[in-house]
Image (cartoon, rainbow, N blue to C red):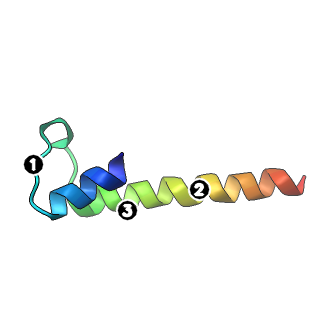
Amino acid sequence: MMLVAGIAQMLGIDMPSLDSGSAGQLILEALAVIFLRKGLKGDVAKV
């Protein structure tokens, strides 16, 4: 959801529910969460 909201803000679409973050910040946080989950799943699978 954050990734979609960030891309929408970059395209100029206003999203009133997400006024607190900038487009770049939302995209970076969404990617961080995605890669963190992927890394944790990989670590759990090794154990």
Q: Position of residue 41 (x, y in %)?
A: 72, 52
User: Which residue is labeled 2 in the image?
Assistant: 36
Residue positioned 35% across, 55% down in the render = 3
Of helix, strand and loop, which one carries label 1?
loop
How far apart are labels 1 and 3 at the CA level? 18 Å
* CB-based contact (under 8 Å), mark 2 and mark 3: no
**Image-quadrant location for residue 7:** bottom left
Q: Position of residue 16 (x, y in %)?
A: 12, 38
User: Which residue is labeled 3 in the image?
Assistant: 28
Sequence-first disc among 2 and 3: 3
Pair 2/1: label in front: 1
**Image-quadrant location for residue 28:** bottom left
Sequence-first disc among 2 and 1: 1
Which dot marks residue 24?
A: none
User: Which residue is labeled 1 in the image?
Assistant: 14
Q: Residues within 10 Å of mark 2 (few under 14, many from 20)?
A: few
**Type of amino acid under label 3:** Leu
**Type of amino acid under label 2:** Leu
Sequence-first disc among 1 and 3: 1
Instruction: Pick the quarter of the image with the N terminus.
Output: top left
Of helix, strand and loop, which one carries label 3?
helix
How far apart are labels 2 and 1 at the CA level? 28 Å
Residue positioned 90% across, 52% down in the render = 47
How far apart are labels 2 and 3 at the CA level? 12 Å
Q: Residues within 10 Å of mark 3 (few under 14, many from 20)?
A: some
